Amino acid sequence: MGDMKSALELAMEKIEKLDKATDEERLKWKYVPEGEKLAVRYIKHGCNLVVEMSRYEENARRYIIEGAADILTRNINLPKDDSVRKNNRKAMDGLKNLKSDKVGVENVFSKMRYIFNHYMEQGEQQRKQAYERLKTEVKAGVQEKLQQQLVSFVGASIDIERQPQFQEEWRKIQIQMDSQYLKHLDEYKQELLGIA
């Protein structure tokens, strides 16, 4: 137990490390959060990133870009509805404004758009088929259980889609189907963060 440090000792060690921080580390600590805040203002209120960036000194800009790019990249998601598609467009436009390697950024965006198109077209069709297949399976299972319990359900309408079993299974299927797309999207996001 002698190896355990008190909260005071841990705090003192952190303060000591702060004193030893380089100017570069201090700039990063200060401006990465500023970049994150800038990205949030851009997403929520539509501020002009180029104008906002011009307000910072050159040595701070790379950290502002780092923080903003992280937030903007995290705001790119599978296009499940119009609001997500709109948000994706905005985040991607913001990243284009921040990054200097426009060709590299556009190459990654092309791959992302391919994933988005596939998700909306073939993926949507696959989700509909899986939904109907699950609906049929759950309905058959519910009817079988009712018959085993000798309950007459003649003329009774069972709303399968509201059954907890159906909803849970559907969530699992959606997560499984989306995971394939998310894996690729996450790879492209990492690639994007690595571009200058």
Image (cartoon, rainbow, N blue to C red):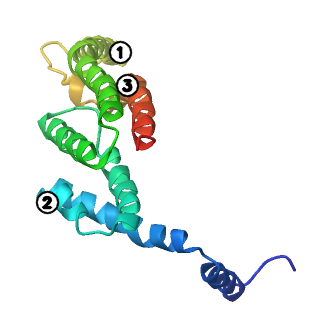
Separation of residues labelled 1 and 2 (CA atoms) = 54 Å
| Residue at mark 1 | 141
Query: Which residue type carries mark 2?
Result: Cys
Kindly indicate the quadrant of the structure image that contains residue 50.
Answer: bottom left
Residue position for label 2: 47
Give x and y (percent) for residue 100.
Answer: 32, 44
Residue 110 position by quadrant: top left
Image position of 126 (left or right of 63)? left
Please tell me which residue lies in front, 125 or 195: 195
Q: Amino acid at mark 1?
A: Gly
**Mark 2 falls on what kind of element?**
loop
> The C terminus is located in which quarter?
top left
**Dot 1 or dot 2, earlier in sequence:** 2
Q: Residues within 10 Å of mark 2 (few under 14, many from 20)?
A: some
Residue 42 horizontal/vertical position (percent): 19, 57
- Secondary structure at badge 3 equals helix
Residue at x 31% of width, y 31% of height: 103
The residue labelled by disc 3 is 181
Answer few, some or many: residues within 10 Å of disc 3's Cα (few below 14, many 20 plus, some between 14 and 19): some
Residue at 14% x, 59% y is: 47
Quick one: 195 or 71, which is closer to the camera?
195
Q: Residue at x 17, y 35 (%)?
A: 85
Left or right of 159, for residue 95: right
Q: Is 4 displayed left or right of 43 in the figure?
A: right
The earlier-in-sequence mark between 2 and 3 is 2
Q: Nearer the viewer, mark 1 or mark 2?
A: 2
Q: Is residue 129 above or below residue 169?
A: above
Q: CA distance from mark 1 to mark 3?
A: 31 Å
Residue at the right extreme? 2
Q: Position of residue 24 (x, y in %)?
A: 52, 69
